[in-house]
Amino acid sequence: MSTYRIREERLPALFEETAKKRKLYLPTDTAEGVAAFLPYREGMTLTASLNTSRSAKDLFFPQTETLADFKVSGREIAVVDVREECEDFLLFGVRACDVKSFEILDRVFLAEPVDSFYKNRREHGTVVSLACASPVETCFCGTFGIDCADPEGDAAAYRWEGYYYFVPLTEKGEEYLASVESLLEETDDGPVWDAKGEIYRKKERLPLKSLTTEGFGGERTKELFDSEKWESLSEACLGCGTCTYVCPTCQCFDIRDFDTGRQIRRYRCWDSCMVSDFTKMAGGNPRPTQKERFRQRFMHKLVYFPAENEGIFGCVGCGRCLAQCPISMNIVKVMKALKEEKE
Amino acid sequence: MIKDSLIPGVAAVASVRADTPDVKTFRILTPEGKKPFEHLPGQCAMLSVPGVGEAMFSITSSPTEKGYMEFSIKKCGCLTSWLHTIEPGQQITVRGPYGNSFPVEGALKGKNLLFIAGGIGLAPLRSVINYCRAYRENYGKIDIVYGSRSKEDLVFYEEIVGEWQKEEGINVHLTIDRAQEGWEGHVGFVPDFVREISPDTDRTALVCGPPIMIKFTLAALKELGFTEEQVYTTMELRMKCGIGKCGRCNIGSKYVCKDGPVFRFDELGALPDEY
Amino acid sequence: MQELMKARAAALLSEGKVNRVLGWAAGEFVYDVTPTVFESREELERDFVYSPFCGANLSKYLVKEARKEGKILVFLKPCDSFSFAQLVKEHRIPREKVYAVGVECYGKTDATALRSLGITGIVGAAEQYGALTLNTLNGERRVTVAEAMLEKCKSCKTKEHRLCDELLGEEGEPVSDCSRFEEVEKVEAMTPEERFAFFRGELSRCIRCNACRDVCPACTCETCVFDNPASGIAQKAAADPFEENLYHIIRAFHVAGRCTDCGECTRVCPQRIPLHLLNRKFIKDINEFYGPYQAGDDPETPSPLTDWKPDDVEPGSAVRKGGRA
């Protein structure tokens, strides 16, 4: 496979060129110190943070989006399809964990019946991933078989000794690299291997490197569901939506109507199994306390999802929940506690 | 752009029938006067009133009814209360069909059937009952045990008395919770009534009603010698998308909207007890 | 201090004076401590921690915990004790169900602030003489405690406790040079347009996770209006771009006069929105309109907003001041 490279100081030129042909999103630092994927503006640079505060799922599954408009006149209703063909866009610098999360989201949204809103964005989006030169303590993508040194995507990028190296992985990736060809030079893939080697050395030092998925999966549904640990694990949970909203694989949503004054707008917005009214019905709630809601979130990722998806877990080990939970309760602590119980 | 399941179609309410003080049956058609879509017995559809809300309802009419679709709806929340105020001619939205169905062309074929319903629980079973009546030769004996709080709360009363009871090979057993004037039939709760009737265990049972009634009916059936593999039910949890994506109607790894709403009790027993 | 607390808790547990202990449990690294209820000496021995990262205010958990059987011991930092006192005052916690132990605090550390300083991969830390030595995946790093303090600790009002049954460590004093209203003054100095733009900018990052509400000791409604589907403004319903703004404004109004300025809202915000500014503006206004008042200061003084006096300012005063109180 061909490898291309560009000098680090030429990156701005690459971004300029890329943005001419499609909308470009970069993980960048905001004034408030929160790294985020934002539409490219002249002079924008990549964040120094390993990852963005919110995940890259936002670009395919936005927090709020309109599903349809209804014009109501008297007893009549007209449904207005407000969907438009999404413009082409490119996500640059997506980490291996987030790239993998797209596969998990695909399994939900692209399963029949296909979610056309999501599909539209997936089809028009190109993902250029970026290997993690310095994984941090909260990283545990390796637990789920993800290699942060060798990210997937349409093209993968590696930073090594003053250069960014690019390897196309799909047709879309080839096409993108061809579109910025004038800025790139073709090279051998030696430095890519050097970059990976360095990352592998760093991965050895990660504190969560020995965490495994052993003991989780569909076959242990009842046993894990009935664990006594849920009570104490969920004790301090505030029932907020932070973990779900920053999680790259959480995709639960709500559908609501809003009267704009001119029409009824039906929109969907992110929802969270952690909040109290998620499953509330007129007649009662199958998950009446935080214990059941908390359990649902982790059972979904560690048991239910793999049960229906050939053993693939619903977590990518990005570590966002580890860094952002207000009370520092997270999937790693849950996994360890449940394992401890088993032993 | 491709059709999207979340964008509903328009339907017009052709007629509204008051079945009980709090249940009404709505007949709906497309604005062109056709049946909105085909379905299987036990399947559901999402009805909505824009600005009020959207919710999942079981389709009460039989698939064999080619001209229209019916929904029997109990007034209990915001949307259902609104629906109860509408008159024929009002448009609403509909999308579906959703979920699996009772295996009328599979496991139920050729079997003696025992339908057990409580209150509005007869609504999803009516679709199956009328399907079986339409293809009578494919099914054996049919027993229908149905109970409600009072005589006035028995849904489809006219149809039960006027059609079902008159058909050969169909036995209807009605009961109400408390004795009342003008009622000469059985008085008592459904599970006890099932024990009294003591149906043969060669039957396949289809149970639907309030959770507590389902629970005790299953216990009664087990006492009579029925196995969990012989009993089907249909579930209801909060739903938003209807297509297994929004994430709220799961029981363990199964989504009621997509993998259900019809479950056999042994399947349900393998799932976490959270419904 | 940690050992002292552990020993005291274990002693009170074994004496039967308390049945449970509400404290912080150590996590995977060093900064990820979790509020936890301990029920035995063994649990305390294994997990209890009191470190520079114990910023979480435990008071609100008492609303739930005090409903349970028996008595619970809680460790309170000075700022936490104001929340506790306020909750007792609001009859949200039966005082007799709680054994409150005040613990000294010289400012807690913000792991996010450390990351902003470029210190990542933190796996261990030690504090000594106002300096933190951090053990990271890329070697040792040192910072002063002041450099990476939680927002709320930067504007600490006092190191003196309220309403505690006993104190461990030395009782502190009010912070004489507390500058917590300086930031508010900066916002007040803006033109209305600038101020509107400022808050729109900050609140535009809100993801409606509701963590600020869920952690807030003043937010103890049994069912929050934002959770009530019938309210039409139920949570996460970002129907239009102003929705989040209203959520925060309504919340600020609702906790006005009851907010002790514990700063938990800003601490937990995953989007680093300076939410305390809204509440602190109310506190400042209350001080100016009704005379100095501190929620949670004592269990008796009625809140100026729920108490009427003939010489109270007229509601229009704030408007006349054009917001520049």
Image: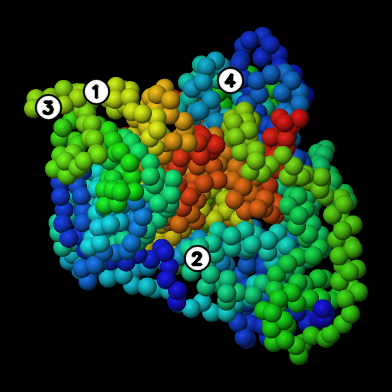
Q: Circle 4 is placed at which residue position?
A: C72
Q: Describe the element under mark 2 as helix, strand or loop.
A: loop
For image coordinates 62% across by 47% down, the residue present is A307
In the image, A163: left or right of C174?
right
Q: Are marks 4 and 2 on the same chain?
A: no
CB within 8 Å, label 1 to label 4: no
Is B118 in front, or is A43? B118
Q: Residue furthest top?
A: C15
Tell me the distance, in whole angstroms, between the alpha carbons under discs 3 and 2. 52 Å
Q: Describe the element under mark 4 as helix, strand or loop.
A: strand
Q: Describe the element under mark 3 as helix, strand or loop.
A: loop
Is A217 in front, or is A275? A217
For label 3, count other residues whose C-alpha is less than 10 Å away and answer few (under 14), some (14-19) or many (20+).
few
The image's mark for residue A114 is 2
Residue C196 in sight:
no
Tell me the distance, in whole angstroms, between the alpha carbons under discs 1 and 4. 49 Å
Query: Mark 4 falls within which chain?
Result: C
Q: Circle 1 is placed at which residue position?
A: B188
Is A288 in front, or is C81? A288
